[in-house]
């Protein structure tokens, strides 16, 4: 398992993520040789968008608590929705480069790139709520990854076709492993229940205590359903440093008291 370095900063916590795992031809790395200030630190376009994510400088790991489907992943885990390059104000672009959109099997691409372990993890921790993982994964890549400037093929050293696909999913999995939301909430006594409700303020406090930043909490029918963890990135998403930051943009739509249902069982 890859090691992760967690550092505490006054304004936000920093997550230093290593480059993705070794594959047969070597380690993925960025063409950027002089990483700049964290994304969203300036309103001016950076001189090199291989070194700074732009305009999608707020990189967001989104998670589901899918309680209305039997394709919901482990009963004690929040699963991945996606990794999104939001603008610094919370708006976003989508489907930015049709030439990079994926029609091949994501699973086949990952295996061909030596990412069987990433695929195995995704099959459990990145499920589609309708049971069609291939469609879901392709949708996430085509809609969001094609808008990450530092994943442009010209920004990946020694690029081979579809390296950007492998890097995107590998990175999302790396970050997901640092955000065990179920454990964060359980440590504060917040666990699924058929009867209990929890104060939204307590949920936010538990997550901020665990991560050093305030995520966005989203509900469906007054029940916990989704979390958005935001980061600014110094350098490329491939091998840069992730700074956990308070989410900017869409606010919580949850009531003051929130339910936390059990997931369905098959």
Image (cartoon, helix red, strand yellow):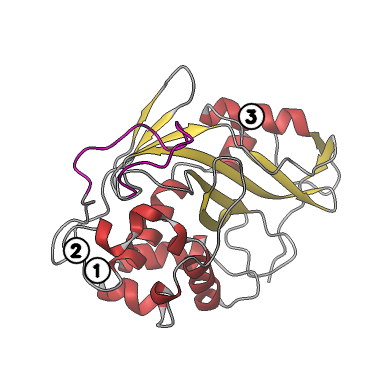
Residue 65 appears in view = yes
- Crowding at mark 3 (Cα within 10 Å: few <14, some 14-19, many 20+): many
Secondary structure of the residue carrying tag 2 is: loop
Residue at 53 percent of width and 26 percent of height: 212
Residue at 33 percent of width and 64 percent of height: 164
Whether residue 166 is in magenta: the answer is no
Q: State how many labels appear.
A: 3
Whether residue 42 is in magenta: the answer is yes
**What residue does disc 2 label?**
23
Picture layout, residue 6 above or below residue 97: above
Q: CA distance from mark 1 to mark 2?
A: 5 Å
Residue at 28 percent of width and 64 percent of height: 153
**What residue does disc 1 label?**
114
- The front one of 229 and 149 is 149
**What residue does disc 3 label?**
206
- Crowding at mark 1 (Cα within 10 Å: few <14, some 14-19, many 20+): some
Residue 10 place in picture, x, y as percent: 46, 16
Residue 78 appears in view = no
Of the image marks 1 and 2, the number of the one nearer the N terminus? 2
Picture layout, residue 246 above or below residue 151: above
Picture quadrant of residue 206 = top right
State yes or no: discs 1 and 2 in contact (Cβ < 8 Å). Answer: yes
Query: What residue span does the magenta drawing correspond to?
Result: 32-49
């Amino acid at each position: 398992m890859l090691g992760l370095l967690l550092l505490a900063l006054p304004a936000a916590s920093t997550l230093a993520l290593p480059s993705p795992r070794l594959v047969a031809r070597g380690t993925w790395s960025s063409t950027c040789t002089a990483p700049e200030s964290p994304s969203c630190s300036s309103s001016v376009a950076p001189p090199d968008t291989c070194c700074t994510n732009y305009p999608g400088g707020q990189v967001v790991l989104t998670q589901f608590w899918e309680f209305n489907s039997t394709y919901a992943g482990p009963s004690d885990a929040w699963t991945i929705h996606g990794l999104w390059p939001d603008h610094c104000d919370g708006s976003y672009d989508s489907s930015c480069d049709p030439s990079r959109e994926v029609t091949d099997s994501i699973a086949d691409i990952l295996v061909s790139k030596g990412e069987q372990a990433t695929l195995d993890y995704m099959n459990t921790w990145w499920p589609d709520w309708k049971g069609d993982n291939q469609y879901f994964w392709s949708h996430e890549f085509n809609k969001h990854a094609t808008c990450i400037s530092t994943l442009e093929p010209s920004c990946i050293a020694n690029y081979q076709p579809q390296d950007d696909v492998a890097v995107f999913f590998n990175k999302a999995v790396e970050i997901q492993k640092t955000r065990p939301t179920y454990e964060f909430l359980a440590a504060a006594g917040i666990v699924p229940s058929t009867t209990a409700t929890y104060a939204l303020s307590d949920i936010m406090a538990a997550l901020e205590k665990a991560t050093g930043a305030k995520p966005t909490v989203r509900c469906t029918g007054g029940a916990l359903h989704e979390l958005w963890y935001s980061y600014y990135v110094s350098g490329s998403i491939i091998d840069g440093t992730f700074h956990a930051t308070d989410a900017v943009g869409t606010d919580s739509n949850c009531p003051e008291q929130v339910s936390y249902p059990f997931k369905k069982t098959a």
